[in-house]
Image (tube, helix red, strand yellow):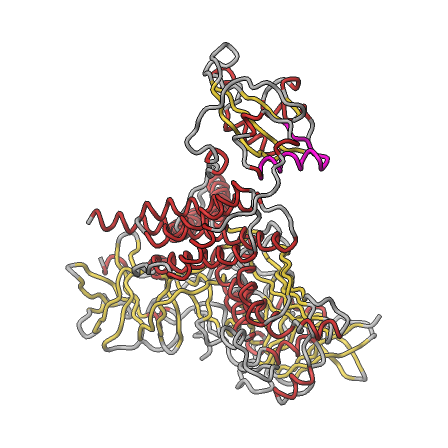
Amino acid sequence: LTALYVVLEVADATYVLPASDVRELETFSGATRVPAAADFVAGVVHIRGRVVPVIDLRKRFGLPPTEYTLESRVVVTEVGDRLVGLIADRARELLRQDSEIKPPPRVIAEQTQGFVKGIVEVDKRIYLLLDLDRIIGEEQDHGEREHHLDDGEPRRRALPR
Amino acid sequence: VSEKVDLKEFVGAFVTEATEHLESAIAKLLLLEGAARSGEPMLRHMRDVFRALHTIKGLAAMVGVEPIVAIAHRMEAILRDADRASSPLTAEAIDTLLEGARAIDARIKVLARGGSVPDPPPSLIARLDELDAQPLTKSASLTSTIALDPALAQKLSPAELEHLAHAAGAGLHAFRADFFPSPARAEQGFTINRVRERVAAIGELVKVIPLSVPANEHAPGGLAFVLLVVTSKSREDIATAVGIDAAALEELGPPTALIAEPVVADEPEELVLGEPARRGIVRVDVTRLDEAMDRLSSLVVSRFRLSREATRLAQSGIDVRNLQALLGEHARQLRDLRAAILKVRMVPIAEVLDRVPMILRSLRRSVGKAVRLEIQGGAAELDKAVAERLFPAIVHLVRNAVDHAIETPDERVRRGKPAEGTVSVSCTEQGSARLVLSVSDDGRGIDRELLARRAESDLPTNDAELLELLCRPGLSTRDEVSTVSGRGMGLDIIRRVAVEQLGGELTVSSVWGVGTTFTMTVPLTVSIIDAFAFECAGQRFVVPVAIVDEIVEIDDRLAMRIASNTSNVRVFMRRGESVPILPLEVLFRLGEMRTGVRKAIVVRRAGEPIAFAVDRMLGQQEVVVRPLEDPLVQVTGITGATDLGDGSPTLVVDLVALGANVRMTRGAAA
C-alpha cells in the first residue's frame, strides 16, 4: 500500500499530511486578521476566489512565534466542504511511503496535545502524522464569538500583529 | 414636484421595457439574417421583429421620444410591407434594419443617462425610406392551392396562405376551427384568449379572424372566431383545445360555403401581431430587492439575539425546549425566505447569451473572417449581479477567439479545416450553485513557444502554467496591435472577474492547431452591497451604507468618559442626544486606543445611536460580499469579506450586530 504525503516543517519537527487532504501549497504573504477569532487563526486569505481561514501551526501547537519567511507556506487542506490553510515554516510535496502508520507512543501523543495521530517511518526518519480534524477544530463546537469591551484583561489574547 | 418626477419615472420604465423589446428585435433580426443566407422561411421572425418595433414605437410615443418613434415607424413599415407582400427581406434590408435597431439602442442609452436624444442620422432615415419605397417582389400567389373560402383567404396575407399551403404539403395539418364565444362556454373555461393559448401550445396559430354571424343559441354574441392553425397534432387534439366537436373541425380541403361575412376590422393583423398579454410578470427595480434583503438581514440579527436570550434562560434552569424548537423552525423559515428573495434576482443565462451574436456580428465584419457562433444556453438561471459581471468576460473571450484564434478562411482550408470557423459558448450547471461557462474555438490554438518567448519565461508544461502566462498583464501573442482586441479587458482582468470578484475559477485548455477552450466556473449568486470603506489601526474594513446613520468627526477631548468601569467608552452629545463612542481598535483588539480628532460611524440599534471611532474613511463603493463560511472565522459583527482590489480579503463589518453584542453599561450612556 503506497501513500503520498505532504511534508510540513514546524519548529524542529517534521509532520506529514495525506496528499489527498491537501489541495495546494501557496507561499504566505500575510493574512487579513479576523478580530475575535481564535488566537491561532492568523486570518483569512483569498485562495482561488474563496475566503479561506489560515491557522498558524506554531500558535496552534503552543510554540513561540517566529517571523514568516519566503519559505513559509500555506498548506491548503480540504476537509469536506471546508478549505483551511495551515501555515508551516516550510512545506514540500511529496513523500511516498508504503510502510504502515503506527499509533504514536503515549509520550508523543501527550506532548503534542493530540495533534499527532500516527507515526510514519521512512528511511529511518520519523514523521509525525497530523490529526487534521483536530487541528482545524472539526470536532469542536464553535459558537459565535463575541467581542468584549471592558477594563480587565482581555479574555482572549490580542491577535498577532 | 409632480410633473418632473412622474416623467422621470416613465422614462425609467420606458428604458427598461424598450431595451427588452429591442434586444428581442435584434435577436430576431440576426435570425432573419441567417434565414436570408439559408433561404429558410422568414415569416415568423419578421412578425416578431415587427411586434417588438411596434411596441417600442408605442412606448416611445408615450414618453415623447420622437427620434425613436421616427426610426421605429420606418422599420415597422418596411416589415409590414414585406409581410403583406410575402416578400423575403434582402440581406441589405436586414442590414439596414439592424442599423436602425442600433440607432434606437444608442438613443435609449442616451435617454437612460438623462441626456437629450439626438435626431436620427439623416442617412439612416434616407435608406429606410428608400427601402420602404422599393417595389417588393411578390411571390407567386398560392391562394388557388389552398382550399379556403375566398372571403377568408382575402383576409390573409400571401405569406400566411403560403404557410398554410406549405404545411399541408409538409406532412402537417392545416385546420380551420370556428369558435363561438358564449357565457356558458366561458364558464367551462373556453374564452377566446384561453383557446388561443391552448391552440398555440400544440400548433402554430397562423391567424385568428373575427366574424360576425347571425346571433342564435349556438352563437349568442353574434360573433365567431375562425382559427387557422398548422399543427402536427390530430384533429381531435385541436378540437379539444378549442372545445368543439372534432367533426366541426375543418381540415383545409375543398372550399366551403362562408357562414357569414367577415367583420370589417380596422387593422385585422393587429389580432395576430398584437403583443400577447404577459401574465403574472412584474418588473422590479433590483434596488428594491436589495432593500428586502437588507430588511431580512436585520431579521437575522434579531433572531441571533433571540436565540442568545433563550440560551440565557436555559442556563438559569428554565425549560426552553419548546422555545428552542420554535427557534429552529424560525431559522429554517428565514433561510427559505432568503432563498425566495434570491430567486427573484435570477435571470436566465440564455437571456445574457442572446446579446452575444450581435457582438460577433460586428466583429466578423472588422476582421474579415468567416465565423459561426454556436450558443448552448441551457436553462440555468443566475443572479443579475453575476450576469452583469460575467457578460463582459464572455464578450472578451468571444472577441479574443475570433480575433486571435480563428484563422483566415484561406489558412483554414490549407490546414484541412472548414473555411468557416466555429466559436461556441456553452453553459451547464454544476450542482445547484455553480455555473460552468465555456468559450471554445476550433482555431489555431495557443503557441506556447511564442508565448514563452514573449514572456521571457520557461515553456509552460501544463494548462495551469499556460494560464498563468496568459494572465500576465500586457502580454500578447500577436505581432500587430489589433483594433478588435486591442481595447477592452486582458485575460488577467477576466480572471480577476471570475476568480476574485465572483469567487469562481478560470481554466484553459489549448491544443496547437486544434483549438482553445476557456472555462469559467462561477457561483450562480453573489451578494453585492454599497459600502463605505474605512481604516482602523492600519487595517481596512467596509461597512454597508444601509446601516450607517451618519459619519461624524469627533474630538475625544470634548467627549466624556463614562463612569469608572468602562474607561474605553466615551459619550458625546449630538443634537441633544447622548451618543456612546466605542473605539473599534479596542473592540477588535487591534491596538491601543487612539485619541484626538477622529471619524466616527454612527449606527442605530433599537433606535438608539452608537458611534464607532475609526481612523479614517476611504470612500464609498459597491463591493461583492463573500460569506465567511468557515466556523474558525464566524464572528459576530463580521458578515463576510470582499476584495477592494489589493488581492487580500477585506472584512465586512455589521456595526449594528457588533453594537448589539458589546457588553457595556448602557445605563451610564443613556
Q: Residue furthest top?
A: B217
Front residue of this view, candidates B46 and B588: B46
Is residue B168 one of those drawn in magenta?
Answer: yes
- Is residue A111 among the parts visible in the rendering? no
- Residue B205 location in percent, x, y? 58, 33
- Residue B403 location in percent, x, y? 59, 73
In the image, what residue occupies the spot 57% across and 22% down? B178
Q: In which image quadrant can residue B393 be found?
A: bottom right
Question: Does residue B656 appear to the left or right of B253 in the view shown?
Answer: left
Question: Does residue A55 appear to the left or right of B221 in the view shown?
Answer: right
In the image, what residue occupies the spot 67% across and 64% down? B422
Magenta: main secondary structure = helix
Is residue A104 one of those drawn in magenta?
Answer: no
Q: Residue furthest left?
A: B576
Question: Does residue B528 appear to the left or right of A56 in the view shown?
Answer: left
In the image, what residue occupies the spot 22% across and 57% down? B670
Q: Which residues are magenta?
A: B159-175
Front residue of this view, candidates B265 and B153: B153
- Residue A161 location in percent, x, y? 44, 80
- Residue B206 location in percent, x, y? 57, 34
In the image, what residue occupies the spot 39% across and 67% down? B542
